Image (spheres, helix red, strand yellow):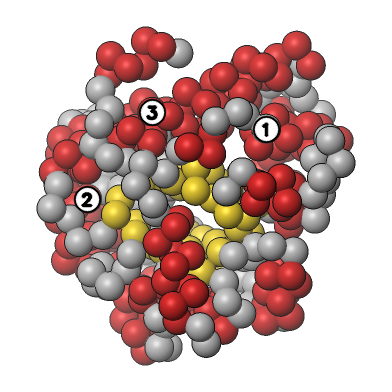
Protein backbone atom coordinates (compact mmCIF):
# COMPACT_ATOMS: atom_id res chain seq x y z
CA UNK A 1 0.00 0.00 0.00
CA UNK A 2 1.33 3.42 -0.92
CA UNK A 3 0.72 5.37 2.29
CA UNK A 4 2.33 8.59 1.05
CA UNK A 5 0.19 8.68 -2.08
CA UNK A 6 -3.00 8.20 -0.03
CA UNK A 7 -1.98 10.94 2.37
CA UNK A 8 -1.17 13.31 -0.52
CA UNK A 9 -4.60 12.77 -2.11
CA UNK A 10 -6.39 13.25 1.22
CA UNK A 11 -4.51 16.50 1.84
CA UNK A 12 -5.29 17.76 -1.67
CA UNK A 13 -8.99 17.07 -1.06
CA UNK A 14 -8.97 19.47 1.88
CA UNK A 15 -6.54 22.06 0.53
CA UNK A 16 -7.06 25.56 2.02
CA UNK A 17 -10.23 27.24 0.75
CA UNK A 18 -11.35 24.22 -1.24
CA UNK A 19 -13.92 21.49 -0.64
CA UNK A 20 -15.90 18.82 -2.40
CA UNK A 21 -18.94 18.97 -4.64
CA UNK A 22 -21.16 15.97 -3.96
CA UNK A 23 -22.78 15.34 -7.35
CA UNK A 24 -23.19 11.62 -6.81
CA UNK A 25 -26.97 11.40 -6.63
CA UNK A 26 -28.14 7.95 -7.65
CA UNK A 27 -30.58 7.75 -10.55
CA UNK A 28 -33.41 7.57 -8.01
CA UNK A 29 -32.24 10.57 -5.98
CA UNK A 30 -31.59 12.81 -8.98
CA UNK A 31 -35.15 12.03 -10.10
CA UNK A 32 -36.42 13.70 -6.91
CA UNK A 33 -34.24 16.77 -7.64
CA UNK A 34 -35.40 16.92 -11.28
CA UNK A 35 -39.04 16.43 -10.26
CA UNK A 36 -38.76 19.61 -8.18
CA UNK A 37 -38.08 21.64 -11.36
CA UNK A 38 -40.25 19.56 -13.70
CA UNK A 39 -37.38 18.01 -15.66
CA UNK A 40 -37.56 14.46 -16.94
CA UNK A 41 -34.97 12.07 -15.50
CA UNK A 42 -33.26 10.92 -18.71
CA UNK A 43 -29.60 10.11 -19.23
CA UNK A 44 -29.31 13.10 -21.58
CA UNK A 45 -30.72 15.49 -18.96
CA UNK A 46 -28.41 14.11 -16.27
CA UNK A 47 -25.48 14.60 -18.64
CA UNK A 48 -26.51 18.18 -19.49
CA UNK A 49 -27.01 19.10 -15.83
CA UNK A 50 -23.69 17.70 -14.66
CA UNK A 51 -21.95 19.21 -17.68
CA UNK A 52 -23.29 22.60 -16.54
CA UNK A 53 -21.86 22.08 -13.04
CA UNK A 54 -18.43 20.90 -14.22
CA UNK A 55 -18.02 23.57 -16.91
CA UNK A 56 -18.66 26.37 -14.41
CA UNK A 57 -15.72 28.64 -15.03
CA UNK A 58 -13.63 29.17 -11.91
CA UNK A 59 -15.40 26.65 -9.65
CA UNK A 60 -12.12 24.74 -9.44
CA UNK A 61 -10.69 27.56 -7.28
CA UNK A 62 -13.03 26.41 -4.51
CA UNK A 63 -13.51 22.78 -5.47
CA UNK A 64 -10.81 20.18 -4.88
CA UNK A 65 -12.87 17.21 -5.99
CA UNK A 66 -16.25 16.04 -7.21
CA UNK A 67 -18.05 12.91 -6.04
CA UNK A 68 -19.62 11.24 -9.06
CA UNK A 69 -22.24 8.56 -9.51
CA UNK A 70 -20.96 5.57 -11.51
CA UNK A 71 -22.86 6.60 -14.64
CA UNK A 72 -21.16 10.01 -14.64
CA UNK A 73 -17.64 8.62 -14.14
CA UNK A 74 -18.00 6.73 -17.42
CA UNK A 75 -19.98 9.45 -19.23
CA UNK A 76 -18.75 12.10 -21.65
CA UNK A 77 -19.19 15.84 -21.36
CA UNK A 78 -21.25 17.58 -24.05
CA UNK A 79 -17.97 18.54 -25.74
CA UNK A 80 -17.06 14.86 -26.02
CA UNK A 81 -14.36 14.58 -23.35
CA UNK A 82 -14.88 12.12 -20.50
CA UNK A 83 -16.12 13.89 -17.37
CA UNK A 84 -13.18 12.34 -15.54
CA UNK A 85 -10.69 13.95 -17.96
CA UNK A 86 -12.57 17.26 -17.94
CA UNK A 87 -12.34 17.49 -14.13
CA UNK A 88 -8.69 16.44 -14.07
CA UNK A 89 -7.84 19.07 -16.71
CA UNK A 90 -9.10 21.68 -14.23
CA UNK A 91 -7.15 20.23 -11.31
CA UNK A 92 -10.30 18.77 -9.77
CA UNK A 93 -10.02 15.20 -8.47
CA UNK A 94 -12.73 12.78 -9.61
CA UNK A 95 -14.29 10.65 -6.87
CA UNK A 96 -16.92 7.94 -6.90
CA UNK A 97 -19.85 6.89 -4.72
CA UNK A 98 -19.39 3.14 -4.28
CA UNK A 99 -22.09 2.14 -1.80
CA UNK A 100 -25.31 0.61 -3.07
CA UNK A 101 -27.57 2.42 -0.66
CA UNK A 102 -29.16 1.86 2.74
CA UNK A 103 -31.38 -1.21 3.07
CA UNK A 104 -33.64 -2.36 5.94
CA UNK A 105 -31.58 -4.00 8.68
CA UNK A 106 -32.65 -7.54 9.57
CA UNK A 107 -33.76 -8.18 13.15
CA UNK A 108 -33.98 -4.46 13.83
CA UNK A 109 -36.74 -1.86 14.06
CA UNK A 110 -38.02 -0.65 10.70
CA UNK A 111 -36.38 2.75 11.29
CA UNK A 112 -32.93 1.18 10.96
CA UNK A 113 -30.86 0.47 7.87
CA UNK A 114 -27.48 -0.89 6.91
CA UNK A 115 -25.60 0.26 3.84
CA UNK A 116 -24.84 -2.42 1.25
CA UNK A 117 -22.24 -2.77 -1.51
CA UNK A 118 -19.24 -4.68 -0.13
CA UNK A 119 -19.62 -7.79 -2.30
CA UNK A 120 -17.52 -7.37 -5.44
CA UNK A 121 -16.22 -3.99 -4.25
CA UNK A 122 -12.53 -4.91 -4.73
CA UNK A 123 -13.08 -5.50 -8.47
CA UNK A 124 -15.21 -2.37 -8.86
CA UNK A 125 -12.56 -0.22 -7.18
CA UNK A 126 -9.98 -1.41 -9.67
CA UNK A 127 -12.25 -0.33 -12.53
CA UNK A 128 -12.93 3.06 -10.91
CA UNK A 129 -9.23 3.69 -10.32
CA UNK A 130 -8.51 2.94 -13.99
CA UNK A 131 -11.19 5.50 -14.91
CA UNK A 132 -9.41 8.19 -12.87
CA UNK A 133 -11.19 8.06 -9.49
CA UNK A 134 -8.81 8.77 -6.63
CA UNK A 135 -11.29 8.90 -3.79
CA UNK A 136 -14.58 7.20 -2.94
CA UNK A 137 -17.62 7.68 -0.75
CA UNK A 138 -19.73 5.33 1.37
CA UNK A 139 -22.66 6.70 3.34
CA UNK A 140 -24.05 5.01 6.43
CA UNK A 141 -27.40 6.33 7.61
CA UNK A 142 -28.34 6.62 11.28
CA UNK A 143 -31.89 7.66 11.98
CA UNK A 144 -32.97 9.27 15.26
CA UNK A 145 -36.49 8.19 16.26
CA UNK A 146 -38.24 6.88 19.35
CA UNK A 147 -36.88 3.44 18.46
CA UNK A 148 -33.53 4.24 16.90
CA UNK A 149 -30.62 4.06 16.77
CA UNK A 150 -29.78 0.78 18.45
CA UNK A 151 -26.20 -0.19 19.31
CA UNK A 152 -26.66 -3.00 16.82
CA UNK A 153 -27.37 -0.61 13.90
CA UNK A 154 -24.50 1.68 14.88
CA UNK A 155 -22.11 -1.26 15.10
CA UNK A 156 -22.94 -2.95 11.77
CA UNK A 157 -22.80 0.37 9.91
CA UNK A 158 -19.42 1.21 11.47
CA UNK A 159 -18.14 -2.25 10.59
CA UNK A 160 -19.20 -1.87 6.94
CA UNK A 161 -17.64 1.62 6.72
CA UNK A 162 -14.32 0.24 7.93
CA UNK A 163 -14.44 -2.73 5.53
CA UNK A 164 -15.09 -0.33 2.66
CA UNK A 165 -12.30 2.01 3.79
CA UNK A 166 -9.75 -0.80 3.98
CA UNK A 167 -10.63 -2.01 0.47
CA UNK A 168 -10.36 1.53 -0.93
CA UNK A 169 -6.90 2.07 0.52
CA UNK A 170 -5.71 -1.26 -0.88
CA UNK A 171 -6.79 0.03 -4.33
CA UNK A 172 -4.99 3.37 -3.93
CA UNK A 173 -8.27 5.22 -3.39
CA UNK A 174 -8.90 7.56 -0.44
CA UNK A 175 -12.11 6.61 1.39
CA UNK A 176 -14.54 9.28 2.48
CA UNK A 177 -16.06 7.72 5.58
CA UNK A 178 -19.57 9.11 5.92
CA UNK A 179 -21.66 8.20 8.95
CA UNK A 180 -24.68 10.47 8.61
CA UNK A 181 -26.88 11.03 11.64
CA UNK A 182 -30.00 12.39 9.98
CA UNK A 183 -31.41 15.78 10.97
CA UNK A 184 -34.98 14.61 10.23
CA UNK A 185 -37.19 14.46 13.30
CA UNK A 186 -38.07 16.73 16.19
CA UNK A 187 -35.23 15.86 18.58
CA UNK A 188 -33.34 18.67 20.34
CA UNK A 189 -29.66 19.34 19.62
CA UNK A 190 -28.61 17.43 22.79
CA UNK A 191 -29.86 14.19 21.29
CA UNK A 192 -28.00 14.81 18.03
CA UNK A 193 -24.84 15.50 20.05
CA UNK A 194 -25.18 12.31 22.07
CA UNK A 195 -25.86 10.09 19.03
CA UNK A 196 -23.16 11.70 16.87
CA UNK A 197 -20.69 11.10 19.70
CA UNK A 198 -21.67 7.40 19.98
CA UNK A 199 -21.53 6.92 16.21
CA UNK A 200 -18.11 8.52 15.76
CA UNK A 201 -16.75 6.55 18.70
CA UNK A 202 -17.94 3.28 17.07
CA UNK A 203 -16.66 4.28 13.63
CA UNK A 204 -13.14 5.09 14.81
CA UNK A 205 -13.01 1.91 16.90
CA UNK A 206 -13.80 -0.13 13.76
CA UNK A 207 -11.37 1.83 11.60
CA UNK A 208 -8.69 1.08 14.14
CA UNK A 209 -9.68 -2.61 14.48
CA UNK A 210 -9.47 -3.01 10.71
CA UNK A 211 -6.15 -1.17 10.43
CA UNK A 212 -7.39 1.68 8.28
CA UNK A 213 -4.65 4.25 7.64
CA UNK A 214 -6.11 7.40 9.22
CA UNK A 215 -3.77 9.76 7.36
CA UNK A 216 -5.26 8.45 4.11
CA UNK A 217 -8.97 9.04 4.73
CA UNK A 218 -11.45 11.90 5.01
CA UNK A 219 -14.34 11.96 7.48
CA UNK A 220 -17.70 13.22 6.23
CA UNK A 221 -19.96 13.71 9.24
CA UNK A 222 -23.17 15.53 9.96
CA UNK A 223 -22.99 18.66 12.04
CA UNK A 224 -24.41 18.61 15.57
CA UNK A 225 -27.68 20.36 14.91
CA UNK A 226 -31.32 20.53 16.11
CA UNK A 227 -33.79 18.13 14.48
CA UNK A 228 -35.48 19.82 11.53
CA UNK A 229 -38.90 19.71 13.22
CA UNK A 230 -37.66 20.62 16.69
CA UNK A 231 -39.45 23.83 17.81
CA UNK A 232 -36.23 25.09 19.37
CA UNK A 233 -33.48 25.64 16.80
CA UNK A 234 -29.92 26.08 18.08
CA UNK A 235 -28.02 29.18 16.99
CA UNK A 236 -25.17 29.12 14.47
CA UNK A 237 -22.63 29.57 17.26
CA UNK A 238 -24.09 26.71 19.30
CA UNK A 239 -24.04 24.34 16.32
CA UNK A 240 -20.41 25.28 15.66
CA UNK A 241 -19.29 24.85 19.28
CA UNK A 242 -21.07 21.55 19.87
CA UNK A 243 -19.89 20.08 16.57
CA UNK A 244 -16.28 21.01 17.25
CA UNK A 245 -16.56 19.65 20.80
CA UNK A 246 -17.71 16.21 19.61
CA UNK A 247 -15.18 16.06 16.77
CA UNK A 248 -12.32 16.95 19.13
CA UNK A 249 -13.34 14.07 21.39
CA UNK A 250 -13.71 11.46 18.70
CA UNK A 251 -11.61 12.24 15.62
CA UNK A 252 -7.87 11.56 15.88
CA UNK A 253 -5.59 14.39 14.73
CA UNK A 254 -4.03 11.98 12.21
CA UNK A 255 -7.11 12.41 10.00
CA UNK A 256 -6.16 15.18 7.53
CA UNK A 257 -9.62 16.60 7.06
CA UNK A 258 -13.29 16.64 7.82
CA UNK A 259 -15.69 17.54 5.02
CA UNK A 260 -19.27 18.00 6.19
CA UNK A 261 -22.46 16.95 4.45
CA UNK A 262 -25.25 19.54 4.34
CA UNK A 263 -28.04 17.05 5.11
CA UNK A 264 -31.00 19.29 4.33
CA UNK A 265 -29.76 22.56 5.87
CA UNK A 266 -30.50 25.71 3.88
CA UNK A 267 -27.68 26.88 1.61
CA UNK A 268 -26.77 29.81 3.83
CA UNK A 269 -27.06 27.85 7.10
CA UNK A 270 -24.62 25.23 5.78
CA UNK A 271 -22.17 27.99 4.88
CA UNK A 272 -22.65 29.94 8.13
CA UNK A 273 -22.10 26.83 10.29
CA UNK A 274 -18.89 25.88 8.50
CA UNK A 275 -17.63 29.44 8.73
CA UNK A 276 -18.39 29.66 12.47
CA UNK A 277 -16.47 26.44 13.14
CA UNK A 278 -13.44 27.68 11.26
CA UNK A 279 -13.61 30.98 13.12
CA UNK A 280 -13.18 29.00 16.38
CA UNK A 281 -9.74 28.09 15.03
CA UNK A 282 -6.89 26.04 16.51
CA UNK A 283 -8.25 22.77 15.14
CA UNK A 284 -6.14 19.64 14.54
CA UNK A 285 -7.73 18.93 11.13
CA UNK A 286 -8.99 20.99 8.21
CA UNK A 287 -12.75 21.58 8.21
CA UNK A 288 -14.39 21.98 4.83
CA UNK A 289 -17.52 21.10 2.86
CA UNK A 290 -18.70 18.12 0.86
CA UNK A 291 -22.13 19.45 0.07
CA UNK A 292 -24.71 18.09 -2.30
CA UNK A 293 -27.93 20.04 -1.89
CA UNK A 294 -26.35 23.15 -0.33
CA UNK A 295 -24.08 23.56 -3.39
CA UNK A 296 -26.58 22.55 -6.04
CA UNK A 297 -30.07 23.68 -5.04
CA UNK A 298 -29.71 27.24 -6.36
CA UNK A 299 -27.99 26.07 -9.55
CA UNK A 300 -30.66 23.47 -10.23
CA UNK A 301 -33.41 26.04 -9.84
CA UNK A 302 -31.66 28.66 -11.98
CA UNK A 303 -31.12 26.12 -14.74
CA UNK A 304 -34.71 24.85 -14.68
CA UNK A 305 -33.92 22.35 -17.42
CA UNK A 306 -33.68 25.12 -20.05
CA UNK A 307 -30.81 25.90 -22.41
CA UNK A 308 -31.17 29.60 -21.62
CA UNK A 309 -30.83 28.72 -17.91
CA UNK A 310 -27.37 27.14 -18.23
CA UNK A 311 -25.36 30.31 -17.62
CA UNK A 312 -27.59 31.29 -14.71
CA UNK A 313 -27.09 27.81 -13.28
CA UNK A 314 -23.32 28.15 -13.59
CA UNK A 315 -23.40 31.57 -11.91
CA UNK A 316 -25.44 30.18 -9.01
CA UNK A 317 -23.07 27.23 -8.64
CA UNK A 318 -20.01 29.48 -8.70
CA UNK A 319 -21.48 31.75 -6.05
CA UNK A 320 -22.18 28.92 -3.58
CA UNK A 321 -18.79 27.31 -4.26
CA UNK A 322 -17.12 30.65 -3.55
CA UNK A 323 -19.12 31.28 -0.36
CA UNK A 324 -18.24 27.82 0.96
CA UNK A 325 -14.60 28.23 -0.07
CA UNK A 326 -14.52 31.34 2.13
CA UNK A 327 -16.34 29.54 4.97
CA UNK A 328 -13.72 26.79 4.81
CA UNK A 329 -11.25 29.48 5.89
CA UNK A 330 -13.52 31.30 8.34
CA UNK A 331 -13.62 34.31 5.99
CA UNK A 332 -17.32 34.40 5.11
CA UNK A 333 -19.90 36.92 6.24
CA UNK A 334 -23.58 37.37 5.46
CA UNK A 335 -23.00 40.54 3.51
CA UNK A 336 -21.15 38.59 0.82
CA UNK A 337 -24.40 36.80 -0.06
CA UNK A 338 -25.74 39.98 -1.64
CA UNK A 339 -23.49 39.35 -4.63
CA UNK A 340 -25.79 36.48 -5.63
P1 LIG B 1 -26.04 16.72 1.13
O1 LIG B 1 -25.01 17.78 1.32
O2 LIG B 1 -27.18 17.11 0.23
O3 LIG B 1 -26.47 16.09 2.44
O4 LIG B 1 -25.35 15.55 0.30
C1 LIG B 1 -24.06 15.20 0.62
C2 LIG B 1 -23.87 13.76 0.41
O5 LIG B 1 -22.99 13.34 -0.30
C3 LIG B 1 -24.77 12.85 1.12
O6 LIG B 1 -24.30 11.55 1.02
What residue does disc 1 label?
Answer: 55
Label 3 packing within 10 angstroms: few (<14), some (14-19), many (20+)? many
Residue 85 in the image, given as x and y percentages of width and height: 73, 51
Few, some or many C-alpha atoms within 10 Å of disc 1 (few <14, some 14-19, many ≥20)? Answer: some
User: Residue 184 vs residue 306: left or right?
Assistant: left
Determine the CA span between mark 3 and mark 1.
18 Å
Of callouts 2 and 1, the N-terminal one: 1
Across and down, in percent, residue 338 comes to 37, 10
The answer to whether 290 is drawn above or below residue 218 in the figure is above
Q: Secondary structure at mark 1?
A: loop
Residue 304 appears in the picture as rendered: no
Toward the viewer: 171 or 7?
A: 7
Label 2's element? helix
Q: Is residue 202 left or right of residue 47?
A: left
Which residue position holds label 3?
Answer: 323
User: Where 330 falls versus 20 (above or below)?
Assistant: above
Amino acid sequence: MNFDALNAIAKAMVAPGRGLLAADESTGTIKKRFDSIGVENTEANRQTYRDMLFTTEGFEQYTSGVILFEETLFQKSLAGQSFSDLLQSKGVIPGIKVDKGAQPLANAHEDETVTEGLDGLRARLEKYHAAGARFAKWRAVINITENAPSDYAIHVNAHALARYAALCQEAGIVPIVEPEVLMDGDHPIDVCEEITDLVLDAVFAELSAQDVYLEGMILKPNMVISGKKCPEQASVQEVAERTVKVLKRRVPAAVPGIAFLSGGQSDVDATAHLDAMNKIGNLPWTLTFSYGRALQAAALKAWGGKTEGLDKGRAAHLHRAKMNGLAAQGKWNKGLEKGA
